[in-house]
Image (cartoon, rainbow, N blue to C red):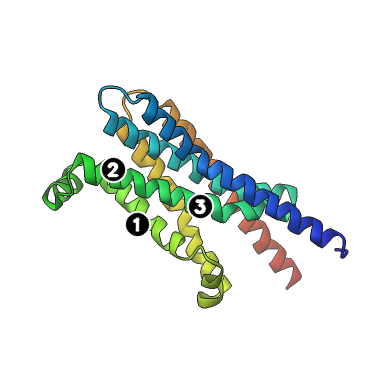
Amino acid sequence: MTAVERPNLAAYARLVKRVATVIALAPAIILCLQVIAGDFGWNPTRAFMDTVGRWAIRLFLLTMAVGPLHRLTGWSPWLAARRRLGVATFAYACVHVAVYVGFELGWSWEMIIDDLADRGAILVGVIALTLMLPLALTSWDGAISRIGGRAWRRLHWLAYPALAHAVYHFGLMVGRDKREALAYAGIVVALLAGRIGAWWARRNRRRLIS
């Protein structure tokens, strides 16, 4: 790479970060406008909670698509979007859970425990958020040097089961119309297949080299 190309890539990475920031903030702006307009109907708390959850899954899918996009194009600035989109995903997921625990259950530990015991969909959602937590905690630059690049990459494989649990939770919570959930599930399968395929190709290349 020439000295001219490096600044260009850095400039493109900054641009990608700005676009990712806009994408990450867009759901919050849309949600605020919907609240102001009274678009959430007769049960605004439940509707708001469901909508935030949908946005969290969509951002999660978009975050996970950054890696395949980079592998397909070979253009490194795409990777600049991943952290901001991932952190935004976790933030919306936390809002989703906070609305459920705070407004639906009134911060009652007894009701929370009962829901976890009686409703499998809630338990699946908790598992998804739990798997996302270490990803969010290690999303800063220093985490890679602290735990090592190899361990960091292995840890971030948790994104796939976290996403799968999130989509499964969504599928269990929606009504009879499962088309949206099935579409999300199809994207998850495609992302996982692509990741495994890339890993297998690298493994075979290493064998040929050695």
Q: Which residue is mark 3?
A: 86
The residue lying at 80 percent from left, 56 percent from top is: 8
Tell me the mark number nearer the camera, choosing from 1 and 3: 3
Amino acid at circle 2 = Val
Residue 179's mark? none
Q: Is residue 100 left or right of residue 108?
A: right
| Left or right for 6, reference 188 | right
- Using the image as rendered, state which of residue 111 and residue 199 is in the foreground: 111
Mark toward the viewer: 3 or 2: 2
Residues packed near mark 1 inside 10 Å, few (<14), some (14 to 19) or many (20 plus): few
The image quarter in which residue 172 lies: top left
Rendered location of residue 171, percent (x, y): 36, 35
Name which of mark 1 and mark 3 comes first in the sequence: 3
Residue 210 appears at what percent x and percent y? 73, 73
Q: Earlier in the sequence, mark 1 or mark 2?
A: 2
Q: From what the image shows, is residue 131 above or below residue 105? A: below
Q: Which mark is residue 130?
A: 1
